[in-house]
Image (cartoon, helix red, strand yellow):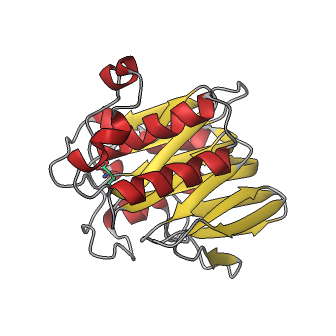
């Protein structure tokens, strides 16, 4: 299962967030602690999206292990930002290992990532996909469950739904169509993070001035809190709100 992380708050260097902490996302790419039977390493690609002044984020995606990208330390050491969504990927069996299947997915101000899998892919969710505009499906980033989840969520956001409500309804709808799916989602616009814990690990760390939501804590800070399964977290630099999405 992939590992992902979102940050909003005081400006931070990408390297200090993603590479140098003791259990950083970089380390989680080769030594994750809590994969719960969903693979062993996250070596099928990585992606980082960050906000650099414009409402639309900058996005970098690469196929292959994060630790093999020799350009990354220099880049991450020279970028300082107040909003980030990054992920390392362990491709679900049967899904393509390509750059465009790596999170984060993006549109407008949004960055999105999925940790998990849709059971019975693709037939279990064909009915939900069939309600989307055909052009959205033709232009899907990659033929993967994560890319379809992004289309389903993006359609709701574009229609003006609130982020937390949109994420909750996508999870509920997909879980009903494809029971036993693993649907840990992360969404941010650079100032708020929405995440779900749905049969996989998710943690939140809130300190004055910054919030982080991540698959695994990246340091020993005692303020990390686990998000209970079946719950949705909304985090900003000054607030954390955790609500139940529904029974799985
Ligand atoms: N199913 C998604 C993919 O293949 C996410 C994989 C994961 O969480 N390991 O991209």
Q: Is residue 99 visible?
A: yes
Q: Exactly how many numbered labels are in the figure?
A: 0
Query: Between 145 and 205, which is closer to the camera in this rendering?
Result: 145
Instruction: Give how far across and how far down residue 76 sits, in percent.
Output: 54, 43
Query: Between 215 and 126, which is closer to the camera in this rendering?
Result: 126
Q: Quadrant of residue 147?
A: top left
Query: Between 210 and 159, which is closer to the camera in this rendering?
Result: 159
What residue is shown at x 31% (from left), y 46% (from top)?
Answer: 125
What residue is shown at x 67% (from left), y 40% (from top)?
Answer: 80
Question: Which residue extends farthest top?
Answer: 135
Q: Quadrant of residue 179?
A: bottom left
Question: Which residue extends farthest left?
Answer: 94
The image quadrant where one finds the C terminus is bottom left
Instruction: Give how far across and how far down residue 75 sits, in percent.
Output: 51, 37
Q: Is residue 225 left or right of residue 42?
A: right
Q: Is residue 159 above or below residue 234?
A: above
The image quadrant where one finds the N terminus is bottom left
Q: Is residue 61 above or below residue 88?
A: above
Instruction: Give how far across and how far down residue 202 sits, in percent.
Output: 53, 69
What residue is shown at x 63% (from left), y 26% (from top)?
Answer: 56
Query: Between 208 and 106, which is closer to the camera in this rendering?
Result: 106
Q: Is residue 122 visible?
A: no
What residue is shown at x 41% (from left), y 22% (from top)?
Answer: 133
Q: Is residue 158 left or right of residue 93?
A: right
Instruction: Give how far across and how far down residue 28 sits, in percent.
Output: 40, 65
């Amino acid at each position: 299962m992939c590992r992902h992380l979102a940050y909003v708050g005081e400006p931070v260097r990408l390297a200090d967030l993603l590479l140098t902490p003791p259990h950083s996302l970089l380390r989680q790419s080769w030594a994750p602690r809590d994969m719960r039977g969903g693979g062993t390493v996250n070596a099928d690609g990585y992606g980082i999206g960050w906000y650099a002044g414009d409402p639309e984020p900058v996005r970098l995606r690469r196929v292959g292990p994060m630790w093999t990208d020799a350009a990354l330390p220099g880049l991450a050491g020279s970028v300082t930002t107040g909003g980030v969504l990054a992920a390392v990927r362990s491709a679900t069996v049967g899904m393509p290992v390509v750059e465009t299947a790596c999170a984060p997915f993006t549109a407008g101000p949004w960055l999105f990532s999925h940790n998990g899998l849709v059971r019975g892919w693709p037939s279990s969710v064909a009915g939900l996909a069939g309600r989307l505009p055909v052009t959205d499906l033709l232009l899907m980033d990659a033929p993967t469950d994560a890319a379809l989840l992004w289309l389903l969520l993006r359609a709701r956001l574009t229609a003006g739904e609130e982020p937390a409500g949109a994420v909750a309804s996508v999870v509920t709808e997909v879980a009903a169509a494809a029971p036993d799916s693993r649907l840990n989602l992360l969404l941010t616009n650079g100032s708020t993070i929405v995440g779900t814990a749905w049969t996989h690990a998710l943690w939140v760390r809130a300190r004055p001035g910054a919030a982080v939501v991540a698959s695994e804590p990246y340091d020993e800070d005692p303020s990390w809190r686990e998000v209970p399964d079946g719950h949705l977290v909304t985090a900003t630099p000054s607030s954390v709100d955790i609500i139940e999405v529904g029974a799985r």
